Image (spheres, helix red, strand yellow):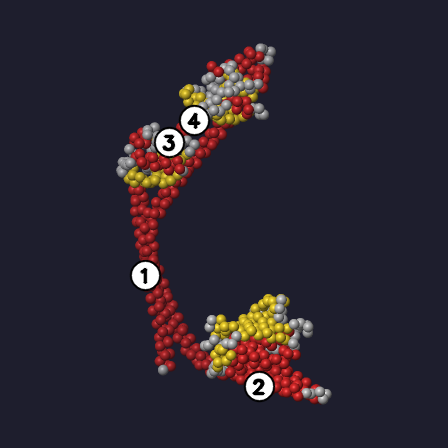
Amino acid sequence: MIFKKEKQILKIIKYTPPIFIIVISLVFIIIQFIERNNNFEEKKLAIKSEFLHENKLDIKQRVYNVHHYLKNEIRENKKALRKSLRARINNAHTIANSIYENNKNLDEELIKKLIIDALKNIKFYESRGYFFIYDKKGRSIFHPHMKNHMGKNQLNFQNSRNEYVIRDFVSLLENKNLSMHEWYWQDPTNLGKEKKKIGVIKSFEPFDWIIGTGEYIEDFNKVVQKKALRHLNKRVYGDSGYIFVINYNGIYLNHLNKNFIGQHAYKNNDTQEIEKVIDDLIDISKKGEGYYSYIQNQKPNTNQTVKKISFVKGLEEWSWMIGTGFYEDDLEKTILERKEHLNKKFKEYVHKTINITIFLTLFLLIFSIYFSKILQEKFNNYKVEIQNHLLNNAKQQAMMSQQSKMAAMGEMIGNIAHQWRQPLSFITTTATGIRLQKDLDVLNDNFLKEGLDGINKQAQFLSSTIDDFRNFFKQDKEKNKFKICDSIEKAITLVYPQFHNMEIEIIKNIEDISIENYENEFLQVIINILNNARDEFTKKDKHFKKMIFIHVMKNKDQVQIRIKDNAGGVPKDIIERIFEPYFTTKHQTQGTGIGLYMSREIIVKNMKGNIKVINSNYSYNNLNHRGALFEITLPLSN
């Protein structure tokens, strides 16, 4: 039978690796094919959304670039205008000061006239720019477009916005020599209209004059806008991409089709539902920015009707809508090209994968045949070694079994020694006391009877201890029904002489509860806990009021036994370890540390209950106490 199994193992070693490699290779090819095919199909499906996303980002970036360019143009040209205005006013001031210095010997009025004549003929900004003069009391000295106000006080003059323009001039130059200012002023080309103006004013101290100049922002913007539109007109992307600009009044300012420029977008019939499309685009621009899809009747350069996606952004300073877009037919063409490219890559990948897999399979087959031969030789060699090891292991196991038995016996003896130490001490102490009283001839019958009874009970306990430990290691222990109160009384009786001598008071609050379990082992646990409390009391002063509280109550289908003392509690650094085997804080002559370990083994493993310990703070008879609290939970029946 063994020889037949060995032959089967050898066949497995010989044929399994090649078969395994062939199967794995086939599975690998199939999985790779399915996975790659699914991957390529997913990519094909994702191409449209990816391309749409890429193109949306592209047109958005183009509009952002234009918007940034225009914002920069507005900012830089406004800065340049301010610089130019300062230069103009400084030039005018230089002219006026030069005339004054060179003609001080002339009449003052003549000097003023020379200055006015010199400045009134200076024009700039395509003849829109000029100089004006007021004195600091508000009287008009010279204004080329308000000659009827010359010589009149204009401090109370208000524009259409109820602004005191001249009064503001005077106020601005109270503490400085030059100031930039913005105000609304009548348009000289349209006398019924006021436009916002940016300008600069400067004090001319010899005559206490204010010399000023400015430029209408609207006129200035038109110049900048023309320059910007010339730049935008050159921005073309591919065959049909461009930047379109429409102001908020619906007028085309820039378009690939030059015929559209200057016309209202409604009239061009460039898209289906033209009015709705233009209104929606302008509304999006006024709110900020956004994408918009619509049907364009004629695609530039093809005159085809196609779907277009545009991105628009508003330029608030000029009330412009800036936008660009892309066409769906370009999208479909690119998608088709990308799909063809993916199909080509997939075919190349499959061909390459098959070639590599075939090569690796052949290589691994040759290697596996060679490896299987080595394994056969190793198997035959190890078979002999295994037989030798089996013989040696059998001898070692027999030896270990004997050692285990000896270790268990040693632990048993240690446990019994721990349990016997206190009763033997009581017996020897009591016997010595009786002998001493007898020698002194003071022995009375009551003490003798009480001592002999105690010795008898302790001896019975020693005998019971041997049975308890023997039963602890047996599997055929029998349960019996007993009363908790009776068992606790037995435990107290066994330890009473020692507790009485140490003046330890036991306060009981025990309900009459019966359970079905191992009474002797339960009795052992109670004694262990009481003895631990007693050992702690030995560290206290003899006048210390020593108390142990035992409280037993029923809780649903369980019984709870709580035993607490007032010995101060268990140190925090060891409270988690007191149930460990052989853990003790006492000297070796006082105990092995097996008592609480055995108590937990009995409660948890044998009696199917639970035991834990905590430090408890409580009050009794109006005094605060602290001590260890052992809580035992047992089922009423198993």
- Mark 3 surroundings: few (<14), some (14-19) or many (≥20) residues within 10 A: many
Q: Earlier in the sequence, mark 3 or mark 1?
A: 1
What's the distance in space between the residues labelled 1 and 2, CA to CA?
81 Å
Q: Amino acid at mark 4?
A: Glu
Name the residue at 62% across, 75% down: 505
Name the residue at 36% across, 74% down: 12
Q: Mark 3 against mark 1, which lies toward the viewer?
A: 3
Q: In this rendered view, identify the residue nearer to me: 80 or 430.
A: 430
Q: Amino acid at mark 3?
A: Asn
Q: Earlier in the sequence, mark 4 or mark 2?
A: 4
The spot of residue 373 in percent (x, y) is 38, 73
The spot of residue 565 in percent (x, y) is 60, 72
Q: Could you say which disc has been placed on residue 460 in the image?
A: 2
Q: Helix, strand, or loop for circle 3?
A: strand
Q: Are marks 1 and 2 in contact (CB under 8 Å)?
A: no
What's the distance in space between the residues labelled 3 and 1, CA to CA?
61 Å
Q: Could you say which disc has been placed on residue 247 in the image?
A: 3
- Residue 254: quarter of image: top left
